[in-house]
Image (cartoon, rainbow, N blue to C red):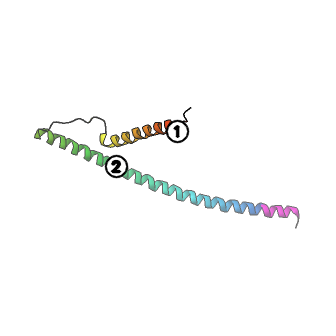
Amino acid sequence: MSAGAWLGLVGLGVAVLALVTLVRLRSRLDRSEARVRSLERQVQDLSSALDDVRRDTRAADHLARRAATHAGVPEELPRVALEPIVAPVVRALSWGAGARRTLVRLGRSRP
């Protein structure tokens, strides 16, 4: 065989390999796109369910406040927004900051 024939066969082999790789990548891309579409549908379902929960929560809060008002219970305003959630986080952060400063002070060498 001549050099040109060898080069032709090698070129054909590279072309076939590239085609096979392209087909595989395309199928992987199609599967990935299908998965993304599925996840987007799930997110949309969760979003609509979350909207329903928010609406129910607001209605329940309104009903509870009305019942408390009619029962004569004074309405106490929260001191901090989302206090039950924020308070433990603030405590942990303040302890962490104090501990960090203390460790830095103790770690310094004294002249």
Estimate how packed mark 2 is, as few (under 14), some (14 to 19) or many (20 or more) residues with alpha carbons within 10 Å. few
Which element carries disc 2, helix, strand or loop? helix
| 53 left or right, relative to 104 | left
Magenta region, mostly helix, strand or loop?
helix
In the displayed orientation, state which residue is furthest to the top: 111
Q: As shown in the figure, which amino acid type bears the numbered disc 2?
A: Ser
User: Which is nearer the eye, 35 or 95?
Assistant: 95
Circle nearer the N terminus (1, 2)? 2
Assess whether residue 37 is covered by the magenta stretch: no
Q: Is residue 19 above or below residue 74?
A: below
**Residue, x 50% and y 37% (percent of image)?**
104
Assess whether residue 3 is covered by the magenta stretch: yes
Q: As shown in the figure, which amino acid type bears the numbered disc 1?
A: Gly
* Viewer-side label of 1, 2: 1
- Residue 48 badge: 2
- Residue 107 badge: 1
- Residue 33 badge: none
Q: Write the start and end of the magenta stretch as one range.
A: 1-10
In the displayed orientation, state which residue is furthest to the right: 2
**Residue, x 42% and y 53% (percent of image)?**
41
Q: Is residue 103 above or below residue 50?
A: above
Which element carries disc 1, helix, strand or loop? helix
CA gap between label 1 and label 2 equals: 53 Å
Q: Is residue 111 above or below residue 28?
A: above
Tell me where residue 74 appears, x and y as whole percent.
15, 36
| 61 left or right, relative to 24 | left
Tag count: 2
Tell me where residue 58 appears, x and y as whole percent.
25, 43
User: Which is nearer the eye, 46 or 38?
Assistant: 46
Estimate how packed mark 1 is, as few (under 14), some (14 to 19) or many (20 or more) residues with alpha carbons within 10 Å. few
